[in-house]
């Protein structure tokens, strides 16, 4: 399954403003792919909207209980909004199945 994660933090917890958080943050980012692999998670993308203190992440895993283990490996306090998502093609196929199952 695919999961869209929005990770937000405050300016008080931002490595950009708290330089002592920068080395462990860099270490966590550089190790995040290996940790994801160990946990059975594929990271499709992880992008930062730095001025807004937010990151957007697309993960794939069959075990959503592993996501918090990966997400909490970053060394600063963040809030996570984790939502299952699907490709639009799959959504369209599901809609066609639903329409076909309706009585005429």
Image: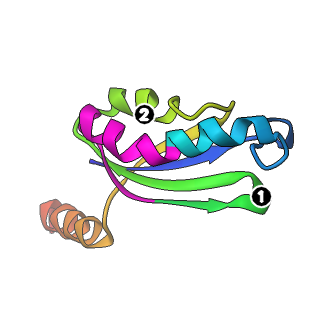
* Residue 73 drawn at (x, y percent): 50, 30
**43 in the magenta segment:** yes
* Residue 64 drawn at (x, y percent): 33, 33
* Residue 98 drawn at (x, y percent): 21, 61
Q: Nearer the viewer, residue 76 or 5?
A: 76
**31 in the magenta segment:** yes
Q: Residue at x 34, y 29 (%)?
A: 66
Whichever of labels 2 and 1 marks the residue nearer the N terminus, that label is 1
User: Is 38 on the left-hand or right-hand side of 72?
Assistant: left
Does the magenta stretch mainly form a helix, a strand or a loop? helix
Q: Is residue 57 above or below residue 78?
A: below
Residue stretch in magenta: 29-45
Task: Identify the disc placed on residue 4.
Answer: none
Q: Residue at x 22, y 38 (%)?
A: 62
Q: CA distance from mark 2 to mark 1?
A: 22 Å
* Residue 68 drawn at (x, y percent): 45, 29
User: Is 97 on the left-hand or right-hand side of 48?
Assistant: left
Q: Nearer the viewer, residue 77 or 19?
A: 19
Q: Residues within 10 Å of mark 1 (few under 14, many from 20)?
A: few
The quarter of the picture where the C terminus appears is bottom left
Which quadrant would residue 58 be assigned to in this image? bottom left
Which residue is label 1 attached to? 52
Task: Identify the disc placed on residue 70.
Answer: 2
Q: Nearer the viewer, residue 92 or 39?
A: 39
Q: Residues within 10 Å of mark 2 (few under 14, many from 20)?
A: some
């Amino acid at each position: 399954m695919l999961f869209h994660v929005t990770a937000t933090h405050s300016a008080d917890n931002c490595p950009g403003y708290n330089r002592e958080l920068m080395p462990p943050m860099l270490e966590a980012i550089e190790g995040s792919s290996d940790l994801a692999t160990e946990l059975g998670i594929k990271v499709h993308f992880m992008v930062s909207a730095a001025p807004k203190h937010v990151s957007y992440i697309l993960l794939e895993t069959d075990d959503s209980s592993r996501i918090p283990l990966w997400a909490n490996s970053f060394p600063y306090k963040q809030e996570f909004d984790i939502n299952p998502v699907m490709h639009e093609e799959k959504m369209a196929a599901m809609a066609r199945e639903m329409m076909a199952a309706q009585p005429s």
